[in-house]
Image (cartoon, grey):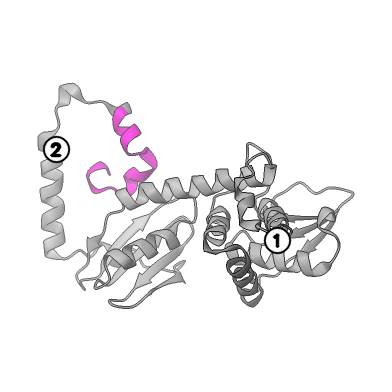
């Protein structure tokens, strides 16, 4: 068995798909792995994949042209998921590779996403749902704060790489605003300039102290909101379990009234 070890990212996995396909070693003899800490097998040959954006774009174009936008977006959202499919013990990169191979071998390839009896498709479905669920939560819970320079800033700590989904949503909803969404987990940020499209940039060296320089209006409204939140609370009816159910505790660090 030949195992192509790729980076745990969309570009990394798509580069792995490109290299594995181009190797002509036989699809049944190939596995993809995005887990850098996997246990190595004595009888497998491991091939390191160097991420290449041009190869990734070629795979993206092929998926869109031959299998459609919905198939492509589903695969991308699977690649954005944290980790691999634990229920089926399958690496997400390998599930993506097998799904693409199966889809391109069939006349109506995009319909393979309906074949949930196939382990790779079941894995794609599970991880895609995982990413969509967290993105849906963050679309509800994400809070922007206005800084002194009038830029809107939000910080999130997602498990999955959902930043592109959030950035696309808020670019559509707030086209005339300058905003930054900082993903502290993955050390990246979505930067949007008014009337332009967003960019995903490396934010490993971001100065978060500048993000706490709120405008006077922001400080006033934050104080008012916290006062309102406290004033409507009924101590005798406090239900911490229900509160955690409505807004999971891992989101509290980025929620003004629950910090």
Q: Please tell me whether the stretch drawn in magenta is mainly helix, strand or loop.
A: helix
Q: Is residue 84 visible?
A: no
What SS does tag 2 mark? helix
Q: Residues within 10 Å of mark 1 (few under 14, many from 20)?
A: some
Image-quadrant location for residue 226: top left
Q: Is residue 196 magenta?
A: no
**Start-end of magenta stretch:** 242-259
Residue 170 is situated, as x and y percent measured from the top left of the image, at: 32, 63
Q: Residue at x 73, y 58 (%)?
A: 101
Q: Left of 91 or right of it: where is 138?
A: left
Name the quarter where the C terminus is drawn: top left
* Gap in angstroms between the C-alphas marked 1 and 2: 57 Å
Residue 217 is situated, as x and y percent measured from the top left of the image, at: 11, 62
Residue 58 lies, with reference to residue 31, above or below; the image says below
Q: Is residue 258 magenta?
A: yes
Q: Residue at x 68, y 68 (%)?
A: 15
The answer to which of 181 and 168 lies nearer the viewer is 168
Closer mark to the observer between disc 1 and disc 2: 1
Q: Which mark is residue 104?
A: 1
Q: Which residue is mark 2?
A: 230
| Tag 1–tag 2 contact (CB < 8 Å) | no
Q: Residues within 10 Å of mark 2 (few under 14, many from 20)?
A: few
Residue 221 is situated, as x and y percent measured from the top left of the image, at: 12, 55
Q: Earlier in the sequence, mark 1 or mark 2?
A: 1
């Amino acid at each position: 068995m030949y195992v192509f070890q790729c980076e745990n990212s969309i570009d990394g996995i798509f580069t792995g798909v490109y290299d594995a396909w181009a190797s002509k070693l036989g699809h049944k003899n190939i596995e993809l792995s995005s887990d850098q800490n996997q246990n190595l097998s004595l009888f497998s040959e491991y091939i390191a994949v160097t991420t290449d954006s041009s190869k990734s774009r070629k795979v993206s174009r092929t998926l869109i042209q031959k299998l459609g936008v919905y198939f492509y977006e589903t695969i991308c959202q699977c690649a954005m998921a944290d980790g691999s499919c634990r229920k089926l013990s399958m690496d997400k990169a390998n599930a993506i590779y097998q799904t693409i191979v199966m889809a391109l071998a069939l006349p109506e390839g995009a319909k393979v996403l309906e074949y949930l009896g196939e382990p790779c498709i079941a894995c794609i479905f599970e991880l895609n749902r995982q990413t969509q669920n967290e993105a849906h939560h963050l679309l509800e819970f994400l809070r922007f704060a206005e800084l002194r320079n009038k830029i809107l800033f939000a910080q999130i700590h997602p498990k999955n790489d959902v930043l592109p989904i959030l950035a696309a949503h808020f670019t559509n909803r707030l086209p005339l605003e300058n905003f930054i969404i900082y993903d502290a987990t993955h050390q990246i940020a979505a930067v949007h300039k008014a009337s332009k499209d967003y960019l995903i940039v490396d934010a490993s060296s971001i100065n978060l102290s500048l993000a706490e320089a709120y405008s006077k209006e922001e400080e006033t409204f934050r104080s008012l909101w916290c006062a309102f939140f406290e004033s409507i609370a009924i101590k005798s009816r406090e239900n911490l379990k229900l509160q955690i159910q409505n807004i999971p505790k891992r989101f509290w660090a980025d929620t003004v009234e629950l910090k």
